[in-house]
Amino acid sequence: MKTIRKPKLTEVAGIKKLLDSAAKTGEVLQRPLMELYENVRDFYTYVDENGIGGCCALHIDMIDLAEIRSLVVREDLRGHDIGVRLLDACLDEARVLNIPRVYALTRNQSFFLKHGFIEVEKSELPHKVFNDCVRCPLFPECDEVALVRVLEVPCKSNAGVAPGDPRNDGGGCGGGPVKGTREMDGNKGTDYELNGYFRQRNRCFLF
C-alpha cells in the first residue's frame, strides 16, 4: 500500500487537504480544488493506509523549463525521505519529457541544495512563471529563494547518433553551466553562467 504514484481523481480532495494544512504555515500556496483537478496530472503522491501522505508536482512552464511545486509530506511521515522520493519522481518525469531545467521557489532552500539545485536570483527566472504571484499572501514582498537544477536529457540533434560519433554534441541538453551562488553539491560559492536563459524578470511564488 505504501507507494509513490500518480493520484486518482478520487484522491484530489486528499491532496487539497494536505496543501491547505501546509498553506496555513506558509509552506506552500493554497490552491483551489478546481485547479487541482485541472492539473492533477502534474502530481505524484505518496499513499499509505491512512490515505494521501505526501505530494509533489512538476508543472511545465515552457518547452525547456518546469517548476517543482506543492511539495508537502504529512507531519507524521516527515524524516523518512518521502519528500526526496517525491522529488525524484518529478525529476524522472522531467527527464522523460526532455525538460533540461527545473526550478523551485522556497524558504526551505537547504532541502533543494542537498539534492542538486543551485541558488539563483529570482530576476533570472522568466516572466511567464510569475502568473500566480497575486495569490501569494506575501505579494509583493517575497522572502523565498529561487533554486535551479540542470538535468541531463537527450538532445534532439543526438537522436540515433552513437556516443562516439563526431556528430554527437555531448548527449545532453541540460549539462551546460548555470549561473548561481553554489556548486551542485551545495558547498562552494562558485558562480556559473546560465547561458542567458533565465536572465529575465522577477517573481514571487510559494512552491
Image (tube, helix red, strand yellow):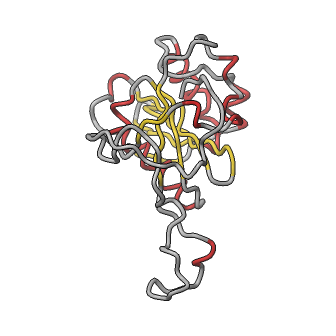
Q: Where is residue 79 in the image (x, y as percent from the top left)?
A: 27, 31
Q: In the rendered view, does 135 fall on the left or right side of 88?
A: right
* 119 or 103: nearer the viewer: 119
Residue appearing at x 43%, y 36% in the figure: 119
Q: In the rendered view, does 36 fall on the left or right side of 83?
A: right
In the displayed structure, would residue 96 be above or below residue 190?
A: below
Q: Position of residue 75 (x, y in %)?
A: 36, 22
* 58 or 130: nearer the viewer: 130
Residue appearing at x 51%, y 59% in the figure: 174
In the displayed structure, would residue 156 be above or below residue 103?
A: below
User: For residue 161, which quarter of the picture?
Assistant: bottom right
Viewport quadrant of the N terminus? top left
Number of callouts? 0
Residue appearing at x 58%, y 84% in the figure: 160
Examine the rendering and report whether any part of residue 1 can be seen: no
User: For residue 189, which quarter of the picture?
Assistant: top left
Q: In the rendered view, does 85 fall on the left or right side of 165?
A: left
* 189 or 24: nearer the viewer: 189
Residue appearing at x 45%, y 54% in the figure: 177
Q: Position of residue 176 (x, y in %)?
A: 48, 59
User: For residue 126, which quarter of the picture?
Assistant: top right
Q: In the rendered view, does 201 fall on the left or right side of 6?
A: right
In the displayed structure, would residue 92 be above or below residue 145?
A: below
Examine the rendering and report whether any part of residue 174 can be seen: yes
